[in-house]
Image (cartoon, grey):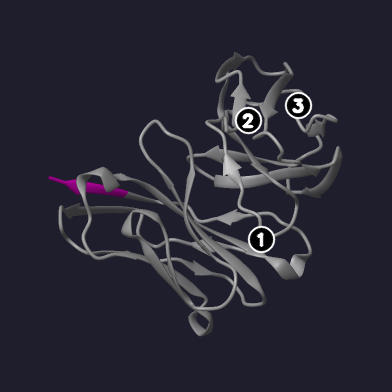
């Protein structure tokens, strides 16, 4: 099975712009979670989608949003970019939203905000 | 607030040395516990997990971890490390009482194994 794929792998934006990141889960997986990884804050949970519905949300401002499509692919959007949004954004997929299901991580999208 | 602590930020070992990485979480309740590894240039991979039952869990590549509920700890161990174990290791916790699945990660431990 192909793993979790994320596009693009690298992105450079300027402050004030918006960005959309994409995640394709492992085939058959219906849950997608997003995490932000920075040197200062480490790995932090952004949100989780299951069956096109946001199930959980972390402590991030409303500039961070996401959605999931009927084929389980997910997109994450960040509006009005700030320098502090520079990070590695990781997507993880899982067969379902059940707590006992392992989450499989993708390679991430590295976002640099100038 | 929920938090996960990994006290060792950078560990340097020689090959064949034993490894123990500490992980403590902030409070009890029902938890799922994980150790993930990130090899240089690669994505996060699951090493092992604890959901219930035997508190000593075995994972891939000879790693094991012990859940000690009274100490809120889930330490990772390996009897004899190899150069290929050089990587960053993350402990993660999911508190089931919150009713949601959201991993809280520790800050990571960078392991460097010298040949």
SS at circle 2: helix
Q: Which residue lies furthest to the front in this view?
A: A1
Q: How many residues crowd around disc 1 within 10 Å: few (fewer than 14), some, or many (20 or more)? A: few
For disc 2, the marked residue is A85
Q: Where is residue B71 in the image (x, y as percent from the top left)?
A: 49, 81
Q: How many residues crowd around disc 3 within 10 Å: few (fewer than 14), some, or many (20 or more)? A: some
For disc 3, the marked residue is A77
Residue B104: image quadrant is bottom right
Label 2 is found on which chain of the structure?
Answer: A
Residue A33: image quadrant is top right
Residue A100's mark?
1
Q: Which of marks 3 and 2 is nearer the N terminus?
A: 3
CA gap, disc 1 and disc 3: 28 Å
Q: Earlier in the sequence, mark 2 or mark 1?
A: 2
Above-or-below relation of A25 to A81: below
Quadrant (top left/top right/bottom left/bottom right) for the C terminus of chain B: top left
Q: Where is residue B67 in the image (x, y as percent from the top left)?
A: 48, 75
- Front-most of A74 and B21? A74
What segment is highlighted magenta in the picture? Answer: B111-115
Q: Residue at x 38, y 65 (%)?
A: B64
């Amino acid at each position: 099975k192909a793993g979790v794929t994320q596009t693009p792998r690298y992105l450079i934006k300027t402050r004030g712009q918006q960005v959309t990141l994409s995640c394709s889960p492992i085939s058959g997986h219906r849950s997608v979670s997003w995490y932000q990884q920075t040197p200062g804050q480490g790995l932090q949970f952004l949100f989780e989608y299951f069956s096109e519905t946001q199930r959980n949300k972390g402590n991030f401002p409303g500039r961070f949003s996401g959605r999931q499509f009927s084929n389980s692919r997910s997109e994450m959007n960040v509006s009005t970019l700030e320098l502090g949004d520079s990070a590695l954004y990781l997507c993880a997929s899982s067969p379902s939203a059940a707590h006992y299901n392992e989450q499989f991580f993708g390679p991430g999208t590295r976002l640099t905000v100038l | 607030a929920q938090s996960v602590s990994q006290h060792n930020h950078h560990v340097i070992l020689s090959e064949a040395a034993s490894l123990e990485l500490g992980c403590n979480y902030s409070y009890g309740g029902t938890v799922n516990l994980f150790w993930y590894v990130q090899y240089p240039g690669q994505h996060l991979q699951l090493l092992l997990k604890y959901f219930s039952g035997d508190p000593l869990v075995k994972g891939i590549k000879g790693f094991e971890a012990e859940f000690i509920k009274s100490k809120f700890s889930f330490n990772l161990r390996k009897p004899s490390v190899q150069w290929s174990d050089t990587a960053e290791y993350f402990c993660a916790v999911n508190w089931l009482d919150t009713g949601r699945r959201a991993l809280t990660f520790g800050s990571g431990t960078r392991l460097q194994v010298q040949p």
